[in-house]
Image: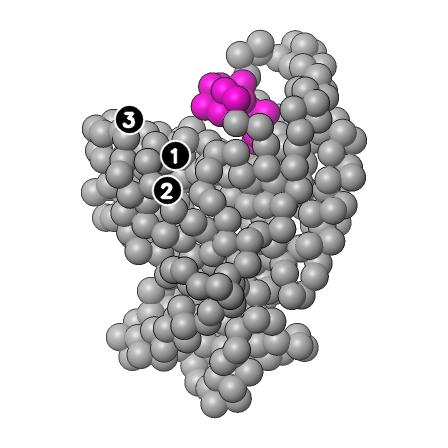
Amino acid sequence: MTSSKQLPFPEVEVTSSTLAAVSAEVGKELGNGKSESPSLSLFRDKEFAAAIIAGAQSVLADLIREAQEYLDDEEVGAACVRTPDSSAGDAYSVFLRTTIMLAFTSSKEVPLADDKLNRTPFTIYGASDDNKAAMESAGLRNFAPDAVLGFHNDGAFADNRVYLPALVGLQNIVLNYRRPGRFYWIPFSLWTEGISLADSLRDHSTRISTTPIAHREGGGGEVVVDRQAVIETPIIWRGNATYPTVFLNGEPLADSEKVFRDIQKSLARNQRRYYTAQSPTRLTLIRNDRGVHARDVLQEPMASGSTASRMLLRTISASGIAVPGVVTAS
């Protein structure tokens, strides 16, 4: 995936001094009867989470506003938050990066959806050689690092409806690959074939088996599938938006395979896209309701057996664009 028309993600930078100021705010909360060796499970405490996020947001306010401007821009819809690379993998650094992710993705206007099993405002996805088979059997082969992950968007359930979360945050906390590759983003405004496809497929309905909602306690242990469903929906629609929207989450049923893949191929042909490196020092923010994303295959692993090759934290908004159609099975 190389092209002169690829654009780097707009970035905001958390400097070492800013990171130290965030760390000081985190330290205040951890000193209030909390563990000195912080665990991500502390974010289950809603009062603690709100306090620590508010403290971080007070330090990061200018950077959050800058990132939000990029996210609100229909021609962009994405931003990358760079953090210093020192001690990127230790427990405190992971806690600090998680706090920063929550500070950039959480707001009173658009709260985050909780992980139902872990009761945290984020979900942890862990991958290793040993759990690859378990992930695939649970329908999570796209989360395997060596899987080819084409352009798609993230979906979520709200009661018995499916929606596209408005904002998605992605933070690699472990990435044991020599060649992790890039992450790609196409806002619908840059999709050159989008409007013509929306016109030609206006009344075309598809049936899609959604990606399972799956959890791993603390990022490890047995894979637990919470929910999977089949949704019958238009493959592409305009609604009230200026640009067409698609639902590309999961796997199409046999009668919908061709049109689903045709849409993916159209997006793959689209030369204009944004890119950023996949790295623990980069928090990726995308307007999931305004575009699609993909990533390179992760290559040359430096871990084997039960050692984590990748651990990814993801946040999603509790609201977004409702996907038209009906859930026909679950």
Q: Mark 1 points at which residue?
A: 175
Compared with residue 310, is residue 202 higher up or lower down, i.e. above or below? below
Q: CA separation, marks 2 and 3? A: 17 Å
- 10 Å crowding of disc 2: few (<14), some (14-19), many (20+): some
Relative placement, left or right, of 86 versus 232 is right
Which callout, 3 or 1, points to the residue nearer the camera?
A: 1
- Magenta part of the chain: 86-98
Q: CA separation, marks 1 and 2? A: 8 Å
Q: Where is residue 302 in the image (x, y as percent from the top left)?
A: 28, 30
The residue at 35%/47% (across/down) is: 143
Closer-to-camera residue (64/8)? 8
The residue at 31%/79% (across/down) is: 258
Question: Which secondary structure lies at badge 1?
Answer: strand
Sequence order check, earlier mark of 2 and 3 = 2
Q: Where is residue 140 in the image (x, y as percent from the top left)?
A: 32, 50
The answer, for residue 44, to whether it is visible in the render is no
Circle 2: residue type? Pro
Circle 3: residue type? Thr
Image quadrant in which you'd find residue 169? top right
Circle 1: residue type? Leu
Q: Name the residue under label 3.
A: 307
Compared with residue 248, is residue 217 higher up or lower down, i.e. above or below? above
Q: Mark 2 points at which residue?
A: 180
Question: Which secondary structure lies at badge 2?
Answer: loop
